[in-house]
Image: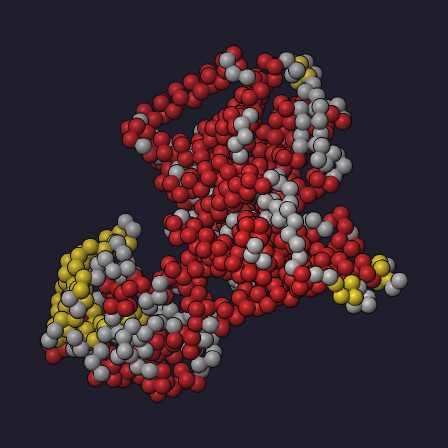
Amino acid sequence: MKPLLQVSGLNAWYGESHVLHGVDMTVGEGEMITILGRNGVGKTTTLRTIMGIVRERKGKILFDGRDMMDVPLHHTAHAGIGFVPEERGIFATLTVEENLMLPPVVAGTGMVLEEIYELFPNLLERRTSPGTKLSGGEQQMLAIARILRTGVRLLILDEPTEGLAPVIVQRIGEVLKTLKERGMTVLLVEQNFRFASRVADRFYLMEHGQMVADFPVGELPERMDMLHKVLGV
Amino acid sequence: MSHTTQAASGIRNGRAPRASITYAAFLLAGLAFLLVAPMFLYPIFLMKLLCFALFACAFNLLLGYTGLLSFGHAAFFGGAAYFTAHAVKEWGWTPELGILLGVAGAAGLGLVMGFVAIRRQGIYFAMITLALSQMFYFFCLQAQFTRGEDGIQQVPRGHLFALIDLNVATNMYYFVLAVFVIGLVVIWRFVNSPFGMILKSIRENEARATSLGYSVAHYKLGAFVMSAALAGLAGAVKSLVFQFATLTDVTWQMSGEVILMTLLGGIGTLIGPIFGAGLVVTLQNYLATSEFPVTIITGVVFMVCVLVFRRGIIGEFYASRIGRRLGFEHRH
Amino acid sequence: MTMIFGIPIQAFLGQLLIGLINGSFYALLSLGLAVIFGLLRVINFAHGAQYMLGAFTALLLLQYFGINYWLALVVAPLIVGLLGALIERTMLSRLYKLDPLYGLLFTFGLALAIEGTFRYLYGAAGQPYSVPVALSGGVNLGFMFLPVYRGWVVVISLVACIGTWLLIEKTKLGSYLRAATENPVLVQAFGVNVPMLLTLTYGLGAALAAFAGVLAAPIYQVSPLMGTNLIIVVFAVVVVGGMGSIMGAIITGYMLGIAEGLTKVFYPEASNIVIFVIMAIVLLIRPAGLFGRDA
């Protein structure tokens, strides 16, 4: 499988604080990778550093063979990486449809508006409401949906199921499975263990700003004890 | 403002002994210079310098130590000048009483303006002080006692404590110098007092100060009034030095000038504003006779300072190699 | 002669019209300030100077190139807007990461430099700029005489305000602006060139100020000082309106202009300061401003 994303020796800082201490990971094209780890180990920072939101960074980030370290933030999406932040980032002063249409299309492979509305009918219904009038689950759908329009190849999701009802969590799982079928590469951070185990191909375990384990979903049963200990789940 | 946080923490941590000695020596040298200066520099020029230096130090009390940018300090400076001039000329008060009135008036103005302006933070605070002082300007323009465009002229210097004739240049100079030193001492004591410490903590982390139970608004208002009173002291004395009080002293351009002096000299340093005032007053003196437009230079200096020279002369010195070697890095 | 509130109706309506015109300028200028502040978090002290630049550009275009008022309405804002964009790109953008007060101080310095330059070149006195022929003269409405140009100013500034509002609230570009105001980093992460958006916004604000300047030229004469005292009043307008809302800035501008006009009728001595007094009152009752959203 061709690696779409290759990260090696990634270090990152928030001001004075050194958060990532040499992260190494590979994401193959079409794979769905989940990063596991306790709170505060640097999972979100890893995503934000790969995306380029965190700029105090050293190391190597290769996306489709291209070095991303010097790419300015507003060009990263055009390279083919899409980001759904933990706080979802739905804009209150924009309607649902404006939120949906905001991220510019970066490649022709994205979904068209009609397809998105088919996949997320409640967004069609509420398309003229202010973005933040939606429920948490609907906002999460919107946050994912607007990236799908852009045609990115790698979708980065930070805790997509956090704080959502089980019914919505299931829906998101379905959406991710659909995306996988269409060939989208997905990198996600998830605390919801069961959810992650149902969608992901491979796991990385993170501890103190580094990856300490890397295993496919098949090995999950034998790793459970170790994970329970590390994650306190 | 935020970049002085590091410097501010230094004062709490104690200072390098060598810096303290160097600093004290430097201050003494400065004082000695000021004591003999009238022998080779025009007393009027020196007195103008001292007044503006005090004005800038008073302003810095608010900006450097409390983090509040007031764009209306001219109201206190010029307002006190008017009050003092009127008292001394129309009511025949002795100079020290006239000055006290000026200071009290400025403090009162500060209380009223501060009370309204404190309602908002940061940028809004600056804009509100500007608008309020502009209101005061229009009041001065139209009021009877200020004589409008003419201003109050021929203000008598009188006899200090009914004894010392301030019309003698040397007497007046040493009086102004004494007021200046007293003003600086007041500022220094204020900054290092418990009140001043709380102000510093408010500037560094207002949320934390509030959670500790301090009424932030009261402290800010207190600092504002103090700063206004001291600015008033400078203005009151100035009206006696030059023997007039005019609208120029209450314009927003004057407010801008004192900001420039402080920025140029070094926000948050004790002696920075003195240097800034010295530089600006000297420059104005030098350019007054030439055709050169002072406003353009003021504007350009502002822009340059903000872009590349934010620490000001003294701030840059403290952070420079020499300054750090002398132990000044965390100095005030 | 008909009287209203003890004053001849002609005088009353005359002052009201002046108030409406002043209000038009307050609205246009506070709109520009609000747009710039919303996205850049900078108080553009140079706004008054850019207003003055607009008027002067119109004057100079006429004097040196024979470019008339109608073209100047488009060309002057374009020139001033481009200059503003240049300043933002080269200097102002370096200040975003600092305390916002530095932005205020920088634009203050810029205002002084611009005004000082023009004062040096043209002196403090005002120069006339004639009302374009098509808008000259007046209309007798029976209860008052309405100069056509004055009426034009009120109408066109309203159009400009509404146009700007539509641009921001109803267009794609406007959605980028609104989103970037809320979360500039995320919008950049989506691939929108936010730094360019910032430059454009500052340019737009400066252009709006310059547009107001061209409108003002035939009424107030073109003088290097025309922007200075005006900008301080506009600051007060903005504080009263609150900076969060575009429509709020527009409405407040008109309201305060009319308030000022009415004060001139009934209590002329207070007319310079009535807006400041209203500001003080609003601050005491509702610190966030009448339409304010952010603190």
- Residue B132 visible, this angle: no
Residue extending furthest toward the top: B39
Q: Is A176 situated left or right of B182 in this image?
A: left
- Residue C282 visible, this angle: yes
Q: Nearer the viewer, residue C170 or B108?
A: C170
Residue B30's quadrant in the figure?
top left
**Where residue C71 sits in the image (x, y, percent)?**
55, 61
Residue at horizontal 35%, vertical 66%?
C192
Q: Nearer the viewer, residue C209 or B311?
A: C209
**Where residue B19 sits in the image (x, y, percent)?**
34, 26
Residue at horizontal 70%, vertical 49%?
C272
**Where residue B220 sits in the image (x, y, percent)?**
53, 44
Up-down relation of residue B155 to residue B148 (above or below):
above
Residue at horizontal 60%, vertical 39%?
C123
Up-down relation of residue A98 to residue A114 (above or below):
above
Residue at horizontal 14%, vertical 61%?
A8
Q: Is A47 situated left or right of A102 in this image?
A: left
Up-down relation of residue B63 to residue C156 (above or below):
above
